[in-house]
Amino acid sequence: MIICRCNEVTLHEIKQFISKKPYATFDELKLATTASTACGRCHSLLKKTYDKINKDLPSNKQLRISF
Ligand code: FES
């Protein structure tokens, strides 16, 4: 599934980036994948996708400190 038509960025690429860099911000995702860096029409879909993937990975971003 293509998320960004201008730069032909797929959902798979988005998922791959987030799985490799779970602490990445939305802007870092845009820079790395080039999604939403041309016309911007895909911005809301990209943001929803970013939010959903992060939400579906519940504990991957939590800092775990063991004592
Ligand atoms: S569709 Fe993503 S920047 Fe145009």
Image (tube, rainbow, N blue to C red):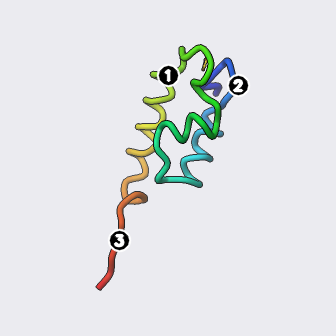
Question: Which corner quadrant of the image does residue 7 belong to?
Answer: top right
- Please name the residue shown 38% across and 44% down the image: 55
Q: Position of residue 10 (x, y in %)?
A: 65, 31
- Please name the residue shown 36% across and 66% down the image: 63
Q: Which residue is mark 2?
A: 8
Up-down relation of residue 62 to residue 66 (above or below): above
Along the polypeptide, which appears first: circle 3 or circle 1? Answer: 1
Label of residue 35 in the image? none
Separation of disc 2 and disc 3 at Cα?
36 Å
- Please name the residue shown 41% across and 37% down the image: 51
Q: Which residue is mark 3?
A: 64
Q: Count residues near mark 1 (Cα–Cα under 10 Å), then give few for <14, some for 14-19, many for 20+.
A: some
Along the polypeptide, which appears first: circle 2 or circle 3? Answer: 2
Q: Which residue sits furthest bottom?
A: 67
Q: Amino acid at mark 2?
A: Glu
Separation of disc 2 and disc 1 at Cα?
14 Å
Separation of disc 3 and disc 1 at Cα?
32 Å
**Secondary structure state at the residue bearing disc 3:** loop
Up-down relation of residue 32 to residue 20 (above or below): above
Q: Position of residue 12 (x, y in %)?
A: 64, 39
Label of residue 43 in the image? 1
Q: Amino acid at mark 3?
A: Arg
Determine contact: label 2, label 3, CB under 8 Å: no
The yes-or-no answer for disc 1 within 8 Å of ligand 1 is yes
Q: Count residues near mark 3 (Cα–Cα under 10 Å), then give few for <14, some for 14-19, many for 20+.
A: few
Q: Which residue sits furthest left?
A: 67
Q: Count residues near mark 2 (Cα–Cα under 10 Å), then give few for <14, some for 14-19, many for 20+.
A: some
**Secondary structure state at the residue bearing disc 2:** loop
- Please name the residue shown 64% across and 36% down the image: 33
Q: Is residue 18 left or right of residue 57?
A: right
Determine contact: label 3, label 1, CB under 8 Å: no
